[in-house]
Image (spheres, rainbow, N blue to C red):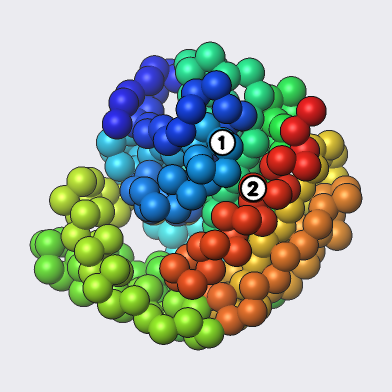
Amino acid sequence: MSQARANGIQIEYETFGDSASPALLLIAGNGAQLIFWEDEFCQSLAQNGFYVICFDNRDAGLSTKFDQAGVPDLMAAFQAAMQGKPVQAAYSLDDMADDAVGLLNALGIGKAHICGLSMGGMIAQVVACRHPEHVLSLTCIMSNTGNPQAPQGKPEALAAVMAPAPEGREAFIEHNLEVWRKIWSPGFPFEEQRARTFMEKSYDRSFCPQGMARQNLAIMATGDRRPLLASIKAPALIIHGSADPLIPLEAGQEAVRVIPGASFLVIEGMGHDLPQGVWERIVDAVSRHAQQANP
């Protein structure tokens, strides 16, 4: 792994494949580190002809933390957002999108295919809006448009992801295993050992629950992105699970309606996660979409 100075912060990143190949930037979700994009998944994309780049968003992993901003009151912010009131945050999705483009610039990459998952999909959308000259194609997985009136996730799923993570390695691991069970794909068996190993690696690499809270605040502060999304020119692919308990399928359907010319892939039985049973299908879909968009 390596670090780059971009948009005024340090960004930790990792690459796979030939740097002469078209670049594919993977953007992780809320609180997730670059190791969310597992090596086998990234290698599969690289074998399909891409220079794959994944990185730690600000306030996650080994990238710059914003601890000086403190720990936000997410419940108060959520209530304000639902009432249409402004939410104050240390940074917004605009800043996180600028981080992503700043990393590309630091690596000498002028244009890239952009793929984001969950919050990463929101950041990818903003990249396509703010920096269209850098975007060859856009793929959003299990994301939304920021519409505050859109259907919300299941209460038990929302409560699980909003609950504060306990301190202590074993408590953290057990807590997050329970979160994963709440958002897991009902059409696929729960991968206990894979999930546990991932949680162990995540805790050992960087324990920063306050960063996840600040990223959540950035989502709320950015608000409804629909007016911006209507301006996207890049070829867009929306991928969503039919059984997503956290960001319902309707959110993906709305994104398809809002983003001009967007195509849609629904994966039956997929929740708010990437079980290994969907990897091949997602790798193939992302690869085909990007290859068709190549100039």
- Counting from the top left corner in percent of width and height, residue 19 is at 50, 23
The front one of 184 and 122 is: 184
Q: Are marks 2 and 1 in contact (CB under 8 Å)?
A: yes
Residue in the image at 60% along x and 64% along y: 281
* Quarter of the image that includes the N terminus: top left
Of the two numbered discs 2 and 1 on the same chain, state the one appearing first in sequence.
1
- Counting from the top left corner in percent of width and height, residue 124 is at 62, 42
- Quadrant position of residue 74: bottom left
Q: Which residue is mark 1?
A: 50
Residue in the image at 65% along x and 67% along y: 240
Q: Identify which amino acid the numbered label 1 is placed on.
A: Phe
Q: Which residue is mark 2?
A: 287
User: Is disc 1 placed on a helix, strand or loop?
Assistant: loop
Position of 36 with respect to 143 (left or right) is left
- Counting from the top left corner in percent of width and height, residue 182 is at 42, 80
* Quarter of the image that includes the C terminus: top right
Q: Can residue 272 be seen from the camera position used here?
A: no
Within-10-Å neighbours for mark 2: few <14, some 14–19, many 20+: many
The front one of 267 and 69 is: 267
The front one of 7 and 263 is: 263
User: Is disc 2 placed on a helix, strand or loop?
Assistant: helix
Q: Is residue 13 above or below residue 117?
A: above
Residue in the image at 50% along x and 40% along y: 46
Q: Identify which amino acid the numbered label 2 is placed on.
A: Ser
- Counting from the top left corner in percent of width and height, residue 4 is at 38, 20
Residue in the image at 41% along x and 33% along y: 15
Q: Is residue 20 above or below residue 185?
A: above
- Quadrant position of residue 118: bottom right
